[in-house]
Image: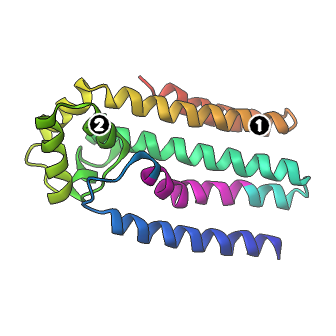
Amino acid sequence: MRILQVLSDATNIIAEGEVQQLINTHDASLDENGYLHVIRSKTAKLFEASTQIAAILANTSPAVEAACATFGQALGTAFQIIDDVLDYDGDAHEMGKNLGDDLREGKCTLPLIIAMQRANVTDAQIVRQAIEQGSTDQLQSILQIVKTTGALDATRQAAHDEAMRAIAALEMLPTNPFTQAMEQLAAHLLLRRT
């Protein structure tokens, strides 16, 4: 029953996160807190439920279960942030999606949020209009804006911080090949900074 409760709660939160993301579509006023709320309600919640269920199946203590849930949430958050970086600084052939796909869908992701905060008024307006219109007509200019404002580096740092939070959660768990693999998985996201 405990597993069913975790799955039920996760399903509800993920559905709410999806609705919130749809509401936020083409909304250039979305801030970092709103962005994090959505990704923690979607991708990160799925990771969190998965790791929490593993702890429940292993009959761990409540503290270990909580640590596993924290690991999953932090790892899922880092994963999604890196995915959002790759929309502006990735290799389309390697990723299987084109640069600017999120922008084309009107998604206001962390690289764009930070770029608008740091850019001059004209450049911020270019980014804002592209989000509101779901347009990639100015994609090359936007790519330049997110790079020159340091938005990509700041976004990578946010992913790095989340990956470190995931690794810190593992301190509650015994050291064994499984927890070492979990740490390596989180550490892999640390390597995605460059």
* Residue to which mark 1 is pinned: 170
Q: Can residue 91 be seen at all in this image of the molecule?
A: no
Vertical placement of 45 versus 3: above or below? above
Q: Residues within 10 Å of mark 2 (few under 14, many from 20)?
A: few
Left/right placement of residue 131 relative to residue 186 reads: left
Majority secondary structure of magenta residues? helix
User: Which image quarter: residue 169?
Assistant: top right
Residue 34 position, x and y percent, is 44, 54
The span picked out in magenta is 34-51
In this orientation, which residue lies closer to the viewer: 109 or 98?
109
Left/right placement of residue 48 relative to residue 92 reads: right
Q: Which mark is residue 117?
A: 2
Task: Give, as a three-letter code, the residue at label 1.
Answer: Leu
Left/right placement of residue 142 relative to residue 79 reads: left
- Residue drawn at x 45%, y 26% is 193
Q: Quadrant of the C terminus?
A: top left
Q: Earlier in the sequence, mark 2 or mark 1?
A: 2
